[in-house]
Image (cartoon, rainbow, N blue to C red):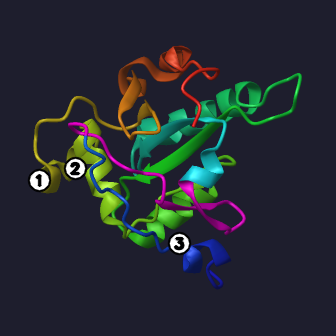
Amino acid sequence: MGSPPAFMALACLSMAAASTGGEGSMNLHDAMVVDQDGHKMRLEDAAKGRTVGLYFAGEWCPMCRSFTPKLKEFFNEKAQDKQTGNQRATIVFVSSDFSKEAADSHFRNQGNWLYLDYDSPLRQQLKQKFRIWGGMESSSLGFDRRSGIPGMVVIGRDGNEITYMNTESKGVKALEAWNLDSNAW
């Protein structure tokens, strides 16, 4: 398997989960994300004018492997404003893979989304905050989860949940709850 793509080397994230004052709120503005081309950027800059969905998934999960292509299709059809051509939404992949190599490989097979580095403490904090993780992760994250993977949450600029989409049980139908025209960053 040749050398890893440039985005893997660039995928060092800065921790930006400082409380912003509200209960359970997180400041994600300075969190660093990487796009499919390997460009590293602040989430604030990447998400400007868009709604942000966190996608919790692992390549080892059969439901995730089945759901990801449907999410890609939904994103490709709906995320771009047909009149202006502007992107209305951004997806940030939060990995439940068991190694950085697996997470990086998983990300390469996704859509034109963003990636929160596997080694970032923010990755685990987001799982705990929104209580979404794979069952095999329960020994390290606890047993009080509301959903397994795949799971999605739309977040506001304050890092708080706007919409929870139970994609684990409802599949692509859950995406209907995502209002792409509101809560833009």
Outermost residue to the bottom: 3
The CA distance from mark 1 to mark 3 is 26 Å
Pick the quarter of the image with the N terminus: bottom right
Asked whether the residues under the numbered discs 2 and 1 touch, taking CB atoms below 8 Å apart as contact, a structural biologist would say yes
Q: Is residue 107 magenta?
A: no
Q: Tell me the chief SS of the magenta region.
A: loop
Camera-side mark, 1 or 3: 3
User: Which element type, helix, strand or loop, lies under badge 1?
Assistant: helix
In the rendered view, would you say 106 is above or below 70? below
Left or right: residue 3 versus residue 56 is right
Amino acid, disc 1 = Ser
Q: Which numbered dot is residue 11?
A: 3
Q: Position of residue 111 (x, y in %)?
A: 67, 46
User: Which element type, helix, strand or loop, lies under badge 2?
Assistant: helix
The CA distance from mark 2 to mark 3 is 25 Å
Left or right: residue 10 versus residue 19 is right
Amino acid, disc 2 = Met
Which residue is located at x 43 percent, y 35 percent?
63
Which residue is located at x 64 percent, y 20 percent?
181
Q: Which numbered dot is residue 139?
A: 1
The CA distance from mark 2 to mark 1 is 7 Å
Q: Which numbered dot is residue 136?
A: 2
Q: Nearer the viewer, residue 70 or 182?
A: 182
Q: Which residues are magenta?
A: 22-43
Q: Nearer the viewer, residue 121 or 66?
A: 121
In the rendered view, would you say 102 is above or below 21? below
- The 10 Å Cα crowd at callout 3, few under 14, some 14 to 19, many 20 or more, is many
Q: Position of residue 141 (x, y in %)?
A: 16, 51
Image-quadrant location for residue 168: top left
Asked whether the residues under the numbered discs 1 and 3 touch, taking CB atoms below 8 Å apart as contact, a structural biologist would say no
In primary-sequence order, the first of circles 1 and 3 is: 3
Q: Position of residue 127 (x, y in %)?
A: 29, 46
